[in-house]
Image (tube, rainbow, N blue to C red):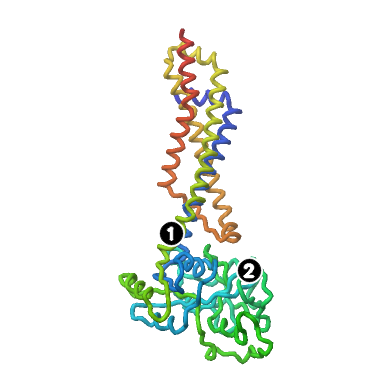
Amino acid sequence: MFAKLALKSLLDRKGSVALSIMAMTVSIFVLLGVEQIRQQAKDSFANTVSGVDLIVGARTGSLNLLLYSVFKIGAPTNNIRWSTYQDIASNSKVKWAIPIALGDSHKGFRVMGTTDDYFKYFHYGKRRPLSLAQGAPFKGVFDVVLGAQVARKLGYSLGNQIVLAHGIASTSFSMHDDMPFTVVGILDPTGTPVDQSLYVSLQSIEAIHKGWKQGVKMPSRSTAQDTIAYADLEPKSITAFMLGLESRMTTFGLQRAINNYTKEPLLAILPGVALSELWQMMGILENTLLVISSLVFVAACLGVSAMLLSSIRERGREIQLLRVVGAPPYFLFLLIELETLFITVSSIFLAAVLLATTLLLSQDYLMANYGLYISGDINVEHGAKLLIGVVIAAFIAALIPSIYAFKKGIHASN
């Protein structure tokens, strides 16, 4: 009876109620959407690299090492001798090692020199391996494998020939145009920086820099591309390398040994710890998004409160009639709160449906254009807590019109 009366009262004012539901639906949609993206972006960020126990580079800050080795942002302070890499990689505690050589680019995308072990041992997400959408890993000196975004944005396919540029600027005048590469593979999308890089062998990096000095191609360079073989191209140095260990129990011991390496200054970091530190630095942006979405919701609550307050002034005869049939003043208070609950629950339902539909329809677009994987699966536990807070906030916002109705009910009885 009580709920039926509240519903009928809302239907009598369906125009203003519909607008209030729309405003609150949009605000809850924004609140849930921001929280969903924030949570999944955080999880995706933390899972950028998985299964790597240590990342080793020249001595620098841990965040700088993480940024240039995993995210391909920035530049190293120095390179590591190849003999140093071989020495550490041959340690009995090391299960596998992935060398990384950076310094070249192609139309704004970074080029990474590595070995085919990169495709075998590098994981992202929850231990998900890399996979090829087309083609195969590089085998020849002038083979290149493309990240998914590189292939999509530049429109490349298998068999295309591309020219690498010296340096990492988006525009370069130092081109390795005498040694073009052939696209032999394209990786599946991962939603990580892997999608935004090109991958060649370490020997490829050595080959294209033969006859170069201090970043400049010497005029006397006359190396024929078809005469270059893997055996002649052992690298002299690399940028960094990743390690997978036989046992996690040995991680800290090996990290300490690498940090105290006497032949050259090195730094070994735990990628999970460094990723957490980096995310903490982004906490201001994260909190700003939450504040903005919360303010949008507060504005919607105030709008509903204003609508109910305005409706009470127009419902004088209804209030008098209820008082005549014996409804106490607190009945009016509860009636307004129940109306608010109906509006809030309806808005929550519509916002949840709208959010699930939007995420489902935009998944492929976000992955293809921004490398951001946002799942349509909403964290029920976290979402429930957020929605309980929404209901409480709506209840508080309705206190002003509810108290006004209560007082008007008292006056109507006098």
Residue that sits furthest to the left in the current view: 249
Query: Quadrant of the rendered structure where residue 252 is?
Result: bottom left
Label 1 and label 2: CA atoms lie apart by 27 Å
- Residue 365 point in image, percent of width and height: 60, 57
Residue located 41% across and 63% down the image: 272
Q: Residues within 10 Å of mark 2 (few under 14, many from 20)?
A: some
Query: Which comes sooner in the sequence, label 1 or label 2?
Result: 2
Residue labelled with disc 2: 108
* Of the pair 196 and 104, the residue shown nearer to us: 104
SS type, badge 2: loop
Please tell me the numbered disc located at residue 277: 1
- Relative to the observer, which residue lies in front, 174 or 379? 174
Residue 1 in view, yes or no: no
Marker disc for residue 369 = none
Q: Residue at x 47, y 67 (%)?
A: 66
- Amino acid at the residue labelled 2: Gly
Point out the image quarter for the N terminus: top left
Q: Where 173 sits versus 409, above or below? A: below
Picture coordinates of residue 202 (x, y %)?
53, 81
Q: Amino acid at mark 1?
A: Glu
Residue at horizontal 46%, vertical 7%?
Answer: 414
Question: Is any atom of residue 382 visible in this view?
Answer: yes
| Mark 1 neighbour class, 10 Å CA radius: few under 14, some 14 to 19, many 20 or more | few
